[in-house]
Image (spheres, coloured by chain):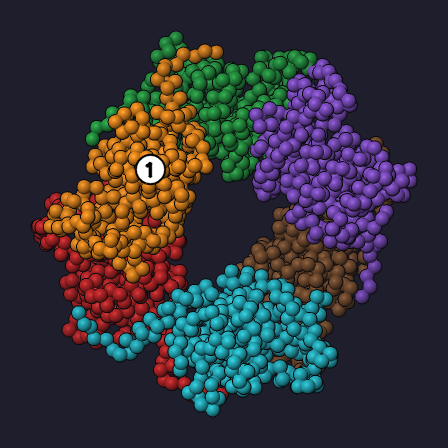
Chain colours: A brown, B cyan, C red, D orange, E green, F purple
Amino acid sequence: MNVNVSQEIIDKASVLVEALPYIQRFNGKIIVVKYGGSAMADPELKASIIEDIVLLKLVGMKPVIVHGGGKEITKWMKKTGTETEFYNGLRITDKDTLDVAEMVLAKVNKELVSMAELLGVKAIGISGKDGNLLTVKKVMPDGKDIGYVGEVTDVDPSIIEKILDDDMLPVIYPIGKDENGIGYNINGDHAASAVAKALKASKLAFLTDTDGVYLDPDDRSTLISELYVSEARELIENGNVNGGMIPKIRNCINAIENGVDRVHILDGRILHCLLLEIFTNKGIGTAIINDDAEKFYKEQA
Amino acid sequence: MNVNVSQEIIDKASVLVEALPYIQRFNGKIIVVKYGGSAMADPELKASIIEDIVLLKLVGMKPVIVHGGGKEITKWMKKTGTETEFYNGLRITDKDTLDVAEMVLAKVNKELVSMAELLGVKAIGISGKDGNLLTVKKVMPDGKDIGYVGEVTDVDPSIIEKILDDDMLPVIYPIGKDENGIGYNINGDHAASAVAKALKASKLAFLTDTDGVYLDPDDRSTLISELYVSEARELIENGNVNGGMIPKIRNCINAIENGVDRVHILDGRILHCLLLEIFTNKGIGTAIINDDAEKFYKEQA
Amino acid sequence: MNVNVSQEIIDKASVLVEALPYIQRFNGKIIVVKYGGSAMADPELKASIIEDIVLLKLVGMKPVIVHGGGKEITKWMKKTGTETEFYNGLRITDKDTLDVAEMVLAKVNKELVSMAELLGVKAIGISGKDGNLLTVKKVMPDGKDIGYVGEVTDVDPSIIEKILDDDMLPVIYPIGKDENGIGYNINGDHAASAVAKALKASKLAFLTDTDGVYLDPDDRSTLISELYVSEARELIENGNVNGGMIPKIRNCINAIENGVDRVHILDGRILHCLLLEIFTNKGIGTAIINDDAEKFYKEQA
Amino acid sequence: MNVNVSQEIIDKASVLVEALPYIQRFNGKIIVVKYGGSAMADPELKASIIEDIVLLKLVGMKPVIVHGGGKEITKWMKKTGTETEFYNGLRITDKDTLDVAEMVLAKVNKELVSMAELLGVKAIGISGKDGNLLTVKKVMPDGKDIGYVGEVTDVDPSIIEKILDDDMLPVIYPIGKDENGIGYNINGDHAASAVAKALKASKLAFLTDTDGVYLDPDDRSTLISELYVSEARELIENGNVNGGMIPKIRNCINAIENGVDRVHILDGRILHCLLLEIFTNKGIGTAIINDDAEKFYKEQA
Amino acid sequence: MNVNVSQEIIDKASVLVEALPYIQRFNGKIIVVKYGGSAMADPELKASIIEDIVLLKLVGMKPVIVHGGGKEITKWMKKTGTETEFYNGLRITDKDTLDVAEMVLAKVNKELVSMAELLGVKAIGISGKDGNLLTVKKVMPDGKDIGYVGEVTDVDPSIIEKILDDDMLPVIYPIGKDENGIGYNINGDHAASAVAKALKASKLAFLTDTDGVYLDPDDRSTLISELYVSEARELIENGNVNGGMIPKIRNCINAIENGVDRVHILDGRILHCLLLEIFTNKGIGTAIINDDAEKFYKEQA
Amino acid sequence: MNVNVSQEIIDKASVLVEALPYIQRFNGKIIVVKYGGSAMADPELKASIIEDIVLLKLVGMKPVIVHGGGKEITKWMKKTGTETEFYNGLRITDKDTLDVAEMVLAKVNKELVSMAELLGVKAIGISGKDGNLLTVKKVMPDGKDIGYVGEVTDVDPSIIEKILDDDMLPVIYPIGKDENGIGYNINGDHAASAVAKALKASKLAFLTDTDGVYLDPDDRSTLISELYVSEARELIENGNVNGGMIPKIRNCINAIENGVDRVHILDGRILHCLLLEIFTNKGIGTAIINDDAEKFYKEQA
């Protein structure tokens, strides 16, 4: 009964079979992907991310992209001679800055849409203004007016739901409007988080420039692949996470407290990082999960 | 039995009653509105046009907006220091020019979306790239490469149909892509016409900077309110229409030959020009209609 | 940018624009119109009322007509030699009287149906017997048997809902039956009110032979255009409303207490009174509204 | 294995089993029943007919009733002092005659509706005016004006189809209107036939005052239970049918030529004649069938 | 008005009319029929039972068959040389015994399916393993291992509901599986009862080898046609029912306590026993009903 | 920008990405899998085949299983003492032989159903008798009566379509019935082919005991991975295929001529052969395709 087949074939079969329970588990589930940072600058990475998202869609998940503008914004700021001032490290967003940001985000948006459509899905790129998706209010840190920077106060997810029902891929850029129709810039991570919460997404994945959360940042073998919210809080309290990660982890915790099942912090610089995180046993990043959930699918790396 | 009511009340009732057969006739019908030119520059006019379109939607029609960028594009060209060259009067569109045009159109798009949403409808702003709406090929006048200027070769109207089915207002800007996903600028009138044809729209309305077609351009009393396609052709052949109108009328004729019932050339500078053209007996512009249709609702002005 | 247009055109546009928020607000809402009295006798008024109702339907509302028989009943009573007796002002309805009333109402019903259909809608005329619409029990004022006079004990609105779902206009005459299938005459205002309550109608409009409720019946400038239920009760208690209006206002109050949003008392003798009340800022009659509602759209006349 | 059961039980089972193939065959099929004549005058017969129709509906058929007014019309003619003149045996229908006929038919209609509803189905009674059901034109025999007598020129069956879709029983009286909305009386048999043809009914059953078609009218044993259209034509040509039956048979032939499968002439004076004709092997009347059909279910009596 | 018709015709009409209220009452209701015992051995009985079930389906009920294997199982046990041991009267079901039972039940199942399909309905035969219909756990009477005998712990009725929605007849044999996919034999009466409870069936009918429950088993005139649950309990307590009936009645009581409206114990040896029980006033067996229900349709035999 | 990841991760990503276009291309497509032979005897192979089929279902395809009985039939033949005779190599199927075959197939069927359900899908096992799936007629080779062996004359695929619509996995065994309801055994390959044709399946895959078609049967490097129908015909004509393969290839050709896009001959002895054939570029067996199709995805091995 034995038949000789090459090791390559055996390996291929085993990867496909390994992916099986994940494809099954996430069928029909919404995954919001925050796409930004270095992963936007490298064309090969960009292509691999769009390819991954299209694959997620093809195997039955419902991906939603929220993206930033990467280095393009800075480039066009320069081109238009728009000067940027800062207050306590926050960029002051006057009308011109907002206009440039909104315009560049729209341009990036259509690039992503075009790339996805070349792979055979229908995509539709919108801002938070469309369909009343994101309502915001002006942010005033320490009472200081830093211009057209808003924070999300209300999400009307019906437009996304309709796009998903119509079997299309929504691609969103984080510009919203207040109740008077005035536009505002929004932090991309917050926008993604707000969208994921409103959609009661199964997953929220942040593509970052780091490869996850480490117990010991100097020891790459201490990457944490799964983390309960309570453990994440402890890590912050004990000072075991480095500074840049803290707001990101806080954002993750908040999303889970608002109904998202699982938040992934992935290294956007790894080719096909989304596929590898979602469809393999080990994954490649850090997943933060609800304390009531089971750490069901990944062993410590 | 007689009851005294003021003339004002009698007049109001009569306007509402006059509108009745038009509301009935156009219920559920698609109307594509090409919005551009001076009507974009004046805030009051802009507000009145969006108000009209929202009203058309509220009374049961299905409006679709296709818009240009007006003077904003020139303004941002200057700001970004993008130089424009011309070939035989055609603007040469290099990558930078295309980028600026696309970005400005996206910004204008979201303004229109925001205005409509303030009036209570859900709007969704897209480009011709979204949902494979507009596929184009490069235009090469006399074999000359004038850059990223495309003409529509294919329209996939399903994204618009879904937006209309979802009871939202589609707002479209005329940037398309070719089969390799490369973006191109498209003439706004042509884009509107292509969309109207693909949707088999009942009506296509151009908001222009002229008040319609005149038998004698010097005699304002000779405005033609209804015109058969055959009559339109004759006017052109006999040299009775002035130069600027000719491509517009040709575009109208082509749309009708492709299934649009009726094309309106309106003076976008008149407040509520859309309402007045559609819901009153006399109308205010020129309608070009199929030879097989009846000139059913307007007497000569 | 200024374009000269006639005052007539400006006025037309302004009427259409004024109507906008009302068309929007009442889209898909049910309005029950009780039609009777003098407005049935005058052919021009009758035509204007049917025209108004058809218009309401065309712009997206869901009108329902409940009508009486007007002077036709008396005419056919005479013709058939049916004598009528009274008890304390109440007409004693023997079998012959009931038969004549039912037959005349059916005839009037089909006239209204025919008129509406000439204007392009499909109408369907039914009595309260059809589809178990109105179940009644015999009325015995002071224990006195006054014959086949019933009051509504149960409404099964499903037949009306189906007719509305099928996009048709229901036209109802107020004859019901008891649990044994015996027919009874019903007061038209009560029937309209019962139907409006069962349908949870947005509006209930009574076309009457008076032009509304006055603070001072002798001073026509004291017409009240909007009135809270609590205010209406006060007016009755303080004796500020004249006798004939009292049962009508009581009926209005009762309807609002049972879920109707707003009840209108209109002068059915004004041409297009329904359009003017519903689609203009001032309105022309008196609206009685829930205390929790906002007096949102009419200033005092 | 043998169990003793009474003959009564055996007989009951056999009737139910006999009915099986017919219930199966006619499931979901439309049957139009023309109800009039003597069968309207006897309360027991009337009850049995409504009971039969309700049963047909309960076992999955879709019955539609078209009815006349029987002796009630004459009674109310007398009561209202309406005189009737005749022209060549045709009743001249002036406006008063039409009004009385329409009113009486409406009254009878609601009686039938009430009776059906007492048996647990929802019924809806309409005239040919409702939902544009029956459009007619004036009949002018030999060019003579005999008043408001119309013949059906157009049937819009959609109102009936909707009523059937809503699982209700349509009850129709034969008053129609012309294109100007003017009402006309229609011959009941013709109205039933027109409705059956427009609905592409499976069956059309006439309840008559005769027990079917005989080969030899004097020999009751010669009742024909099934007859091809071609045979029916021959019987007429050969003078083998008596005078009164001829127009009825012609009407049957015409219905079959227009898409009805099978037309039944039943003796409305037999209790439960409909059930017996449809659910038993022998039937009790005469069925006229398409030449292409099989005489599948009845042997000669 | 009197018409002479034969007594036979009058009787037929009366049987059909008698069936009317039952057909009406049970329209769309689910009836689970447990079919087994002697009624499986006689071909004529078998045909009559399938015929009855098809008729129930045709008149709008939703029958579900649960069947045993009758004498076929014993026959194939012998053929395969499978020996059966008993423990306290319970058959010990080793793997071979289970295999034979499952295989024979499948064969019988397809016979029933074929018979029903010859009568024009689509049938689909399944076991409790299909669609996770019946989940069981091993039965251990007095802690003794008697092999592959299971009792139902969970029913997933969705597969039956889908089959019914698809307008097909489900035919089920009582083999289930535990959570590890191991197959078990199930008592047929219990399986039928479990299915009826999960479907919230209106009726559950057991075809038995007895003609019902008697007050005095020796006096055939004391058959009880309707019995409240409380009365059934009393009969058992008072020792008024004979031994074999007790578990059957207990099963009935349990089904009613779990939402089945009415359980019938019928003599499967009477031809068309199902029709006679369901569609006639007297019925032929014993119905056990909820104490809150009305003994609405049968007088004491 | 470079990030170090292990070769294992790179390989995994590449397998997943390789599978992408196939998952996309076959989404929603029907694949009929004929399962039989040695692959039924080995438990690990059996598990891998069911796992593959469940995976195909999870990623959006619609698999349908048609299976044989493997060595179980012979085993039970022996057990029941059923003797088998042969005529010209064809097994003579008397009633006992048919009964045993049908019973064993049913038992195997439920094993496969149970295995699939353990993996989380709902499966439903049926024979060709259920839902009139397979109608057959008796086969008489050379006019010789070889008993209950039938060939498919008609397929009613609606039952399969409904099972697929209900998102369940159909598992079919090849027993059919003729027009009188008599059961017959059917060749499994023919049954699979008939089902695939009736469903207009995209793919039909035969799991065989050979690893595909070779140009030179003695040279394993000459496996043909893709073959046009015309080429397949040539191979047969030229005697380049060995005897056992000929009827199988003929069956493939016939399926393609009847609307199946592509037929696969796979070596059922390779673990996960289905996954490897469908989701990898090279595949592992031989696909026979329409001459009009493109050999789009496999290079010669």
Drawn side of residue A288 relative to residue D125, left or right: right
Tell me the residue at 55%/58% (across/down): A162
Tell me the residue at 24%/53% (across/down): D142
On the image, the x and y values in percent for residue F127 come to 63, 30
On the image, the x and y values in percent for residue C31 come to 33, 60
Seen as rendered, the residue at the extreme right is F219
Seen as rendered, the residue at the extreme front is D238
Which residue, given by chain and number where applicable, does mark 1 sit on? Answer: D237
On the image, the x and y values in percent for residue F70 come to 74, 27
Residue E71 or residue A162, whichever sits in front: E71
- Asked if one can make out residue A130 in the rendered structure from this viewpoint, the answer is no
Residue D109 higher or lower than C294, as above or below: above
Tell me the residue at 71%/77% (across/down): B140
Q: Amino acid at mark 1?
A: Glu
Residue A32 higher or lower than B109, as above or below: above
Q: On the image, which quarter does residue C284 sit in? A: bottom left
Q: Within 10 angstroms of label 1, few (less than 14), some, or many (20 or more) residues? A: few
Tell me the residue at 39%/56% (across/down): C167
